[in-house]
Image (cartoon, rainbow, N blue to C red):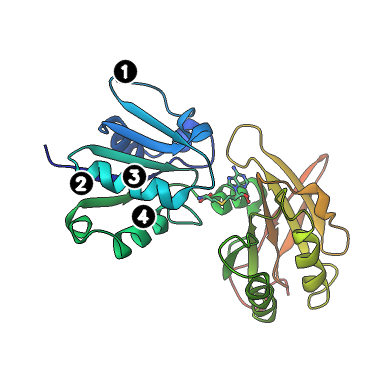
Amino acid sequence: MNGSLAIVGLGPGRSEYTTPAASAAIAAATDVIGYGPYLDRIAIVDPRQVRHATGNRVETDRARHALELAAAGRRVAVVSSGDPGVFAMAAAVFEAVESGAPAWRELDIRVEPGVTALLAAAAEAGAPLGCDFCAISLSDNLKSWATIMRRLEAAAAGDFVIAIYNPASRARPHRLGEALDLLRARKSPATIVVLVRAAGSGEAARITTTLKDVDARSADMRTLVLIGSSATRLIARDGRAPWVYTPRREGDGS
Ligand code: SAH
């Protein structure tokens, strides 16, 4: 038997948002590895399939384990929520390949993309990513807080729409507040801010506000925060949340 490793994105929550290619890669696997709550989202089709549930913080160990199983001839799927290449397992696997056994480079490894949180969150709001945007994670597990602040500063200077992943954690509850203070010092107080919790999961909740009024405590670990560019604007609707969009053409709306 030839081993293989699929690094699979499950999408943001609803099973309809898992691609058919991702589902097929999981169905074909002898072994599925991932954070326990993500494994719970996958229907068991074949009871012989082995499920390896791990904690959320052990990505490097999980990546090596997946590679060892694949090298031993198993068909392995490693799952992430959203897209596996966005702040998730795909890079952890390639880090392990680069520093690991030479034989791992010969393995059949492929990445199955998924709908990342920023796309699901943007779709809840309208079209906030209609012009240039960037994504920044506020997690300082693997990079310094100084680097994060420097990148936020550069994103503000470039007038990008900024998607903030990992806005909150138990270890650092004030990090979104600090990030917003930095942005308030550099952008208009009227800048549109959207917080989407559990985007694309069927339980999505959206807050649409401004940089002046946003309360950092409204974000938790399942929230994606979108900070508008100077052109991002609202379309008001009676009794319903406004649409949020960023015009494609420079000069429109700014
Ligand atoms: N690989 C994932 C991101 C992992 S980082 C992806 O591509 O979506 C984890 C962060 O992603 C969370 O702290 C949150 O900011 C964001 N996130 C993940 N799923 C989300 C969802 N359904 N709604 C809003 N934000 C989400």
**Dot 3: element:** helix
Residue 89, position in %: x, y? 43, 51
Relative side of 23 to 122, left or right:
left
Question: Eyeballing the image, is 176 above or below 181?
Answer: above
Closer to the camera, 106 or 61?
61
Asked if residue 131 can be seen in this view, the reply is: no
Q: Is mark 1 within 8 Å of ligand 1?
A: no
Determine which residue is flagged by label 4. Answer: 93
Quadrant of the rendered image containing residue 124: top right
Q: Residue 170, position in %: x, y?
A: 72, 48
Residue for badge 3: 65
- Label whose residue precedes the other's in the sequence (4 or 2): 2
- Which residue, given by chain and number where applicable, does mark 2 sit on? 71
Indicate the amino acid at tag 4.
Val
Crowdedness near tag 3: few (<14), some (14–19) or many (≥20) residues, C-alpha within 10 Å: some
| Residue drawn at (69%, 73%) of the image | 149
Furthest toward the right, the residue is 213
Mark 1: which secondary structure? Answer: loop
Label 4: which secondary element: helix
Q: Amino acid at mark 3?
A: His
Of marks 3 and 1, which one's residue comes earlier in the chain?
A: 1
* Above or below, comparing residue 232 to residue 69 in the picture: below
85 and 19: which one is in front?
Answer: 85
Q: Residue furthest top?
A: 47
User: Disc 2 marks which amino acid?
Assistant: Ala
